[in-house]
Structure formats: structure tokens, C-alpha cells
């Protein structure tokens, strides 16, 4: 019997990350060093492609990714029936095709068709990606092969909420009867679409988590640059010029049809699909009876199904233009691609999304390159989540950013000179669980009275001043965008949630025609803005997962109150001698184990806590030689020795004072609380120090100490 060796990388699953406040400081420092850029992306789930590949080559094994394993968990719930799910077999490309290759004869939108997954928004974005070879090669590293140094491991790069990440996958793909069930290449030997889709599914949480979306989401993740969304029912006067400039730049363009009365993708009499994403693939002006007609070419990611109105493949209008234009444009084939007039495009489609590496395509003025400023922040219930302007007494508590428009040419004659993007960052690992808040922003002109203001503008400013402009409505979307005209002057921009006391992270991006001095306004001027990052979690134990769900809320999280019940009623049931964990102790544990700073634990964070609790419980009873149900000072020292930790007398005394009873003994609950804090604080020091000393700014130190 021949057996195939495989490499499973599981060290990340066992590793316990430091608390989120520590991770944020690390992220900010890494970003200052260039980490998270396209040339130095962060390793998603801390998986290093080069190291993993080298390990597999040395060991002569093929890689299996246990962070996104080839099983039903990676497909997700609700997408397939249990019977169909049981038929799924995960195969490597060599088991699917005779001569697998990443790319066969270049890459094109015509390389693939959509599978059973409702991710037309993602595939439309891939179609746009194929037009930009530079961007494509950034997302899909082209040096990956199935022959030379092949060991079943691939990687892709995406921009995710302020940073580029490198995503590692194995090449096992879900099939039924030997055929791919998700995106399928027309050439059976070509696998870049299927592997790219798998990598993005890993980022989203599962294949199911890719269901439903808008093209701009993936296009932004491919470019990490500027995003413009144009409502086609009210198009700008220069829409054609804007699209032409975008087509000549490194941009991706996509659009969507309005949703019908149901969520079904019904095919309309004109051939278009309701609630469906399309790719803009071409622009052309032709002369018809002495008049110029602007045509837009679009592509359906289904790979079939086309518009049947004017300028469709069978339209007679092609017979009244020049033979040169007809030969250049017309391709009669049911390949999902078709032409339509600009007027019909604006009537039939809801919006146009343009995503590019830079905003220079906006006005075509090569003499002034657009500048970009990006800031990351948080709304925190009770402190910096003041809600919209309807909440006059609390609005001022929202994050504030001050900036200056200096040039006399900027905004001249009503020209748009500021593009503002407010993007909220997810607080859930799985995309389908993300519940977007209603977000928006207001921009105020700074009056003479407040030009010397140091720190946040008070409530009195907002009670006496109205916004000069603001987002049209508060949207429960990933991103809110406004293209604005601002005259020279000083301004204050206030991002907000519609309702007060809603916690979330955000990225505020200001694209400006001129260099713009901008800074966060909560402290002294020029204070740097803290970078806020989300942390990805590790896999979970399924039995503990089931128990966790019995106590978790609808978002599959537990707060301190729910954690208290879980620990006292399940984890330590029968071992508690003195009343169990207090609510304050549970709040502390949540803060220490909470990697995403939500005030709650998800299932993976809880499982890590559970494992720690069980470990320390065992140490407690092994070192309680007096069998009193408490630890004396000497027994506490033995407990540290048993764990392999060294503490001096002064530290031991402090621990006894902080966590022990007045008699100098320590209960099980106090011991566990102590050890979790001690372990976490050690990790913070190791992550933020040079091994000997640690240099923290005051704001960094306060950030750690006040939450953990």
C-alpha cells in the first residue's frame, strides 16, 4: 500500500495571542516599519508561506492547511444539503485534471464560470481583475507552479481593512464525482480561479460566507486604493469621461442591477439578471448617422446570459456603423459579454463602482496628483460613540479629525476636490455574521473662535455650528463614500454611528486634491493616531463549541455575565469552594483574552480560556498538599515552579496581597485569575520589549493598563 505524507501546520491553533490592546500597539509599530504594505504583507493567521513550503520540501510532504481544512467546516452551513455535503471529496488538482497548471495561456474573464455558490459579486470582481495585469500579479503571485518544487501549497494577497495580508492555502478543492462544485475553469487544467476563490473563502470564514455581496468589496480587497461609488440614477455630468480615465488607469469597474421583489436572480425580458453583479469590460464611441453614441461593454460572471436590447449581439444597429468599428467590437457568442448604450446602462443598472490603486483618474489633471490620508479609530459605547447629530449632547464625544484645505485652486468653481471614505471594520471572523452599523460623517468649518482649540471640540461648538457638508444618509454598509467640494479653510470631520453607544472600529480615508494637514483631535495637535487592527482567531474544539453555543448570545459570543455562568456551572462545577468566579473576575478574564476588543469572547477565545482554566485548576490541586482547598504562600510558590515560571519574593508577596484572602491563602478562583493575568502580562512584555526593557508612550501604557 502506498501512502502520501502530508504536512499539517497547527502551531497557530495552540498559540495564545496576547490581548488585543497589545496587538494593536504591535500592529501600529509594524505598520511604521512598512509591515502590511503590498511589498511586505502580513501573514494571515501568522502562516508564513515560504517557511511552510520549505518545511514541506525538506520533509517531502504535501501541505494540508488545518486553519482552513478540507472538510465541511470550510464549506460552511446551509449552502448544501447534508446528502450532497456527504458526497463532497476534496481533491488536489492532479486528481482532477491530467496536467494541472495555475495559468494556461494567460488569464482572462472567459477562463471560468460560476459554480453553485452565490458569489457573482466576487467573480465579477475577478473578471475586472484580469484586465489589470499589474494588479493581478500582486493578488496572484505568478511564480507558483505544479511541477517545480510542488508540495500542495499556494498563497494569495488581499487588502483587508487597512493592510495587505498574505493568505496561505493547500490545493485540496471540493468536488463531487471528480468535478469542482464552485468556480470552474473552462480549461480543465487551469486552477487559478478555484485557488483564488478558496483563498478568499478562507478570509471570509468559509465558502458559505462568500454568498451575496457587492463587487466593490472584493475590488477594494484586490487594490487597497480608492473607491468611488456612482449612483447611476443621478450620474455626474462627466460620467463618460470619468469611466474613460478609469479604464486607462489601474482600476477595476463593476456594477449591479437592482434587486427584484424577491432575492432570486430572475432573468428580465431584456436578458439582464435582477440583483446581479456585472463587470465593465470596455468603452467605445461609434458614429451613428453623424451622431456619437457612447457604448459600454459588460460581462455576466455566469459566462452566459446577455442583454437583448439595442447594441446587443443580434441588434441591427451594428449594421449602420463603420465596418471597422463593427469588426473591432462585435462578437456574436453566448459568452455573457455584450454592449449597450450609455443611456440604457444608466437606466438598467443601480450603481457603478470604480476601485483603483490611486485616485488620480478622478479628474485627469496630471499636474496635481491626489493625496491620501488614512486614520483608524473606534467608537466605544459610553465614551466615544456619541451617535449622529440627533444626539446633540453626546455627538461631540465621537472621534474628531481636523484638516486644512489650503490651495486657492482646490475646489475652484465648484470642482470636486475631496473624496471621503468611512469604512467600518468587522468584529466577527465570519463574514456572514457581520452586522454593519448605520454609519456616516459630518464636516464642519472651524470658526475663528475655535482655531486655537487644543483637543476635542466641545458640545457648544456643535450646538452653534451646522455642517458644511455630510454623508447623505447613514448606511448600514461596509463603506460610506462622498465626493465633495470644499473651499480653502480649516475643517473638522466627525465620523459617527447613527445611534449612540454602538461599538465598532473604522477606517477614515480622505483623498484630497492638495496636500492636506490632518490629525486626530482628541489630544494635543499632531498627536499620532493609533492604528486599530482586527486579529484572526484559531480553530476550536467541537465539543466545547457545542457547550459554548448553549450559553452564547445570538452573535455567538459571551460577555462577562454569560462567562460567569459557563465557568461556575460547567467548567469548575464541583470544584468551587467559595462561591465561584465573581463578575469582576470574569470581566478581567474577558479583557485579557479578548483579542478583538469587543468586550466579549467568541468561541475560539473562550476555548483558549477554558484550556487555561483547566490547566491551572490541575496545578492548583496538585500543589495543595495540605488539602485545604486553598494555597498557602509556600504552596503558591510551588505552583509557579510546577508551571515552570519563576517569580521573586517581592512579586510573590504582591500576588498574595492582590489575589489572596486576608489570612494569606488563595482560593481556586483567585489562583486561576492570577495565573491568567500573569501569563498575559508576560506575553505583552515579550511582544513589546527587546527582551530586557520596554519603552511605551504614555498613551500606549494607559491603553494596555486600563483595559487589561
Image: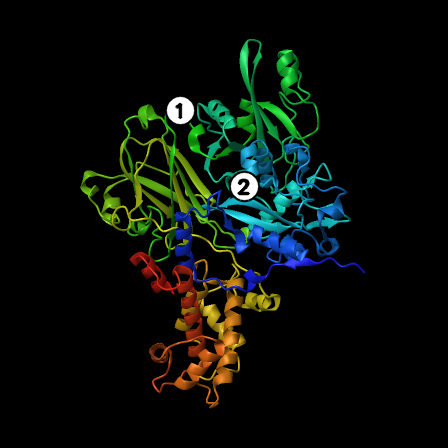
Q: Residue at x 36, y 62 (%)?
A: 704
Above or below — where is 160 with respect to 628? above
Res. 678 visible in picture? yes
Q: Nearer the viewer, residue 423 or 341?
A: 423
Above or below — where is 231 with respect to 159? above
| Residue 202, horizontal then vertical, whole percent | 59, 51
Q: Nearer the viewer, residue 687 or 464?
A: 687
Q: Secondary structure at mark 1?
A: loop
Q: Nearer the viewer, residue 458 or 686?
A: 686
* Residue projecting furthest to the top: 290
* Residue projecting furthest to the front: 58
- The numbered mark at residue 218 is 2
Q: Is residue 165 left or right of residue 706?
A: right
Residue pointed to by mark 1: 365
| Residue 641, horizontal then vertical, whole percent | 46, 79
Q: Secondary structure at mark 2?
A: helix
Count of numbered marks: 2
- The numbered mark at residue 673 is none
Q: Quadrant of residue 664?
A: bottom left
Amino acid at each position: 500500500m502506498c501512502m502520501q505524507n502530508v504536512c499539517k501546520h497547527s502551531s497557530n491553533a495552540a498559540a495564545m495571542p496576547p490581548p488585543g490592546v497589545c496587538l494593536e500597539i504591535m500592529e501600529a509599530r509594524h505598520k511604521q516599519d512598512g509591515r502590511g504594505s503590498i511589498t511586505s504583507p502580513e501573514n494571515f493567521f501568522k502562516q508564513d508561506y515560504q517557511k511552510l513550503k520549505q518545511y514541506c520540501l525538506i520533509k517531502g510532504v504535501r501541505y494540508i492547511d488545518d486553519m482552513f481544512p478540507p472538510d465541511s467546516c470550510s464549506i460552511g452551513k446551509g449552502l448544501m444539503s447534508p446528502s450532497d455535503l456527504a458526497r463532497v471529496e476534496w481533491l488536489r488538482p492532479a486528481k482532477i485534471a491530467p496536467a494541472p497548471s495555475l495559468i494556461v495561456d494567460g488569464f482572462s474573464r472567459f477562463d471560468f464560470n460560476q459554480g453553485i455558490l452565490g458569489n457573482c459579486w466576487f467573480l465579477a470582481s475577478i473578471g475586472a481583475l484580469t484586465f489589470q495585469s499589474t494588479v493581478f500579479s500582486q493578488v496572484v503571485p505568478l511564480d507558483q507552479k505544479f511541477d517545480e518544487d510542488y508540495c500542495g501549497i499556494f498563497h494569495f494577497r488581499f487588502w483587508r481593512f487597512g493592510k495587505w495580508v498574505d493568505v496561505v492555502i493547500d490545493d485540496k478543492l471540493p468536488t463531487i464525482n471528480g468535478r469542482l462544485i464552485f468556480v470552474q475553469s473552462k480549461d480543465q487544467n487551469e486552477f487559478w480561479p478555484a485557488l483564488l476563490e478558496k483563498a478568499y473563502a478562507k478570509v471570509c470564514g468559509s465558502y458559505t460566507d462568500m454568498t451575496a455581496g457587492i463587487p466593490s468589496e472584493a475590488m477594494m480587497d484586490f487594490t487597497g486604493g480608492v473607491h468611488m461609488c456612482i449612483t447611476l440614477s443621478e450620474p455626474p455630468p462627466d460620467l463618460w469621461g470619468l469611466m474613460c480615465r478609469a479604464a486607462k488607469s489601474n482600476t477595476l469597474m463593476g456594477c449591479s442591477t437592482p434587486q427584484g421583489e424577491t432575492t432570486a436572480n430572475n432573468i428580465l425580458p431584456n436578458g439582464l439578471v435582477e440583483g446581479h453583479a456585472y463587470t465593465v469590460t470596455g468603452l467605445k464611441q461609434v458614429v451613428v448617422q453623424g451622431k456619437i453614441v457612447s457604448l459600454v461593454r459588460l460581462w455576466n460572471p455566469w459566462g452566459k446570459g446577455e442583454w437583448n436590447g439595442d447594441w446587443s449581439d443580434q441588434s441591427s444597429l451594428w449594421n449602420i456603423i463603420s465596418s471597422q468599428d463593427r469588426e473591432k467590437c462585435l462578437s456574436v457568442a453566448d459568452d455573457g459579454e455584450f454592449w449597450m448604450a450609455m443611456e440604457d446602462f444608466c437606466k438598467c443598472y443601480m450603481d457603478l463602482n470604480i476601485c483603483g490603486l490611486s485616485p488620480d483618474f478622478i479628474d485627469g489633471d496630471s499636474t496635481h496628483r491626489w493625496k491620501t490620508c488614512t486614520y483608524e479609530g473606534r467608537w466605544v459605547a459610553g465614551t466615544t460613540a456619541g451617535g449622529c447629530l440627533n444626539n446633540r449632547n453626546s455627538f461631540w464625544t465621537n472621534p474628531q479629525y481636523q484638516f486644512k484645505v489650503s490651495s486657492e485652486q482646490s475646489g475652484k468653481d465648484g470642482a470636486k476636490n475631496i473624496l471621503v471614505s468611512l469604512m467600518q471594520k468587522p468584529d466577527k471572523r465570519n463574514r456572514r455574521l457581520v452586522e454593519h452599523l448605520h454609519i456616516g460623517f459630518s464636516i464642519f468649518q472651524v470658526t475663528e473662535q475655535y482655531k486655537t482649540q487644543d483637543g476635542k471640540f466641545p458640545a457648544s461648538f456643535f450646538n452653534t455650528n451646522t455642517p458644511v457638508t455630510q454623508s447623505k444618509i447613514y448606511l448600514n454598509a461596509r463603506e460610506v463614500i462622498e465626493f465633495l467640494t470644499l473651499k480653502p479653510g480649516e475643517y473638522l470631520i466627525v465620523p459617527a454611528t447613527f445611534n449612540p453607544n454602538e461599538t465598532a472600529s473604522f477606517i477614515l480615508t480622505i483623498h484630497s486634491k492638495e496636500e492636506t494637514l490632518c490629525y486626530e483631535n482628541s489630544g494635543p495637535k499632531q498627536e499620532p493616531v493609533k492604528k486599530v487592527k482586527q486579529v484572526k482567531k484559531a480553530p476550536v474544539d467541537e465539543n466545547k463549541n457545542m457547550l459554548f453555543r448553549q450559553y452564547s448570545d445570538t452573535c455567538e459570543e459571551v460577555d462577562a455575565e454569560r462567562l460567569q455562568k459557563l465557568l461556575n456551572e460547567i467548567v469548575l462545577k464541583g470544584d468551587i469552594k467559595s462561591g465561584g468566579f465573581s463578575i469582576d473576575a470574569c470581566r478581567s478574564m474577558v479583557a485579557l483574552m479578548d483579542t478583538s476588543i469587543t468586550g466579549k469572547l467568541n468561541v475560539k477565545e473562550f476555548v483558549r480560556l477554558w484550556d487555561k482554566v483547566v490547566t491551572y485548576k490541575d496545578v492548583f490541586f496538585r500543589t495543595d498538599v495540605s488539602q485545604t482547598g486553598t494555597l498557602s504562600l509556600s504552596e503558591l510558590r510551588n505552583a509557579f515552579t510546577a508551571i515552570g515560571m519563576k517569580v521573586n519574593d517581592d512579586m510573590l508577596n504582591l500576588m498574595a496581597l492582590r489575589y489572596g484572602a486576608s489570612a494569606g491563602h488563595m482560593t481556586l478562583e483567585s489562583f486561576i485569575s492570577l495565573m491568567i493575568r500573569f501569563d498575559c502580562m508576560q506575553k505583552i512584555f515579550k511582544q513589546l520589549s527587546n527582551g530586557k526593557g520596554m519603552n511605551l508612550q504614555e498613551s500606549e501604557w494607559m491603553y494596555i493598563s486600563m483595559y487589561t
